[in-house]
Amino acid sequence: MTEKKGQFVALLRKVNEIAASAQIRTQKLRLICELLESSVPYYNWVGFYLVGDKERELVLGPFVGEPTEHAEIPFGKGICGQAAESKKTFIVQDVSKETNYLACNLNVKSEIVIPILKDGKVIGELDIDSHATSPFTDDDESFLEGVAGVVSGLF
Ligand code: SME
C-alpha cells in the first residue's frame, strides 16, 4: 500500500469513529471537515452542502475555510450543482478551465465534489477546494466516496 493510501485508510477509520460518537449530527459533520482540512495539506476548504426543504437546492452546512457567498446552490449550477445533477463525483483539476463554476476565492485552483446519496437520491455533498492545481488522484476519490458513504449513514 502506498503511504498516501495508508493515510487515507487511517483517516477513514477516524471518520467512522466520529460518526459513531455521541455528538449531534451537525457537530459530527463539522468534526469531519476539521479532520480532513487539518490532515490533508491540499484540502484547503472542506464543507458540506445539504438538500433542505427546497427540492433541487443545496444549502451550505458545516464547513472549514474561508466564508463563501454561495450559501444556496441550485442543482445544475456550478461544480456543486452539476455533481448533484449527475449524482457522480465531479473533479475539476483546474477551475480556470470550467465555465460552469461559482468562484468563492481566487486562491482556489481545483475542486472535488462528492454527492451523498440516500436511497438513490442526492441528500447532500462533500465539497473540497484546493489551492493546488491537479492535486486529486483516484486515491482521493475512493477515500472521499468512502467518507460520503459514512455520512449517508448519519441520515
Ligand atoms: N465552487 C463551487 C461553489 C461552492 S464553493 O467552492 C464553497 C461551485 O462551483 O459549485
Image (spheres, rainbow, N blue to C red):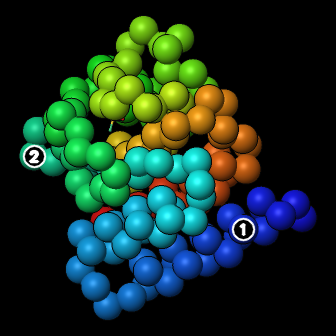
Q: What residue did someone put label 1 on?
A: 7
Quadrant where the C terminus is found in the figure: bottom left
Please state the horizontal and vertical placement of residue 59, each as a whole percent of the image.
19, 43
Viewed as shown, does residue 141 lie left or right of 147?
right
Q: Is mark 1 within 8 Å of ligand 1?
A: no
Please state the horizontal and vertical placement of residue 56, each as a whole percent of the image.
22, 32
Residue located at (59% from left, 58% from top): 40
Q: Quadrant of residue 118?
A: bottom left
Q: Nearer the viewer, residue 67 or 50?
A: 67
Q: Quadrant of residue 57?
A: top left
Crowd around label 2: few <14 · some 14–19 · many ≥20 (10 Å)? few
Task: Answer whether residue 57 is visible to the viewer in this image.
Answer: no
- Gap between marks 1 and 2, in whole Å? 37 Å
Does 106 sit above or below residue 59? above
Viewed as shown, does residue 41 lie left or right of 32?
right
Q: Quadrant of ligand 1?
A: top left
Q: Of marks 1 and 2, which one's residue comes earlier in the chain?
A: 1
Q: Is mark 2 within 8 Å of ligand 1?
A: no
Q: Secondary structure at mark 2?
A: loop
Q: Marks 2 and 1: in contact by CB < 8 Å?
A: no
Q: What residue did someone put label 2 on?
A: 53
Residue located at (28% from left, 26% from top): 75
Residue located at (23% from left, 54% from top): 61
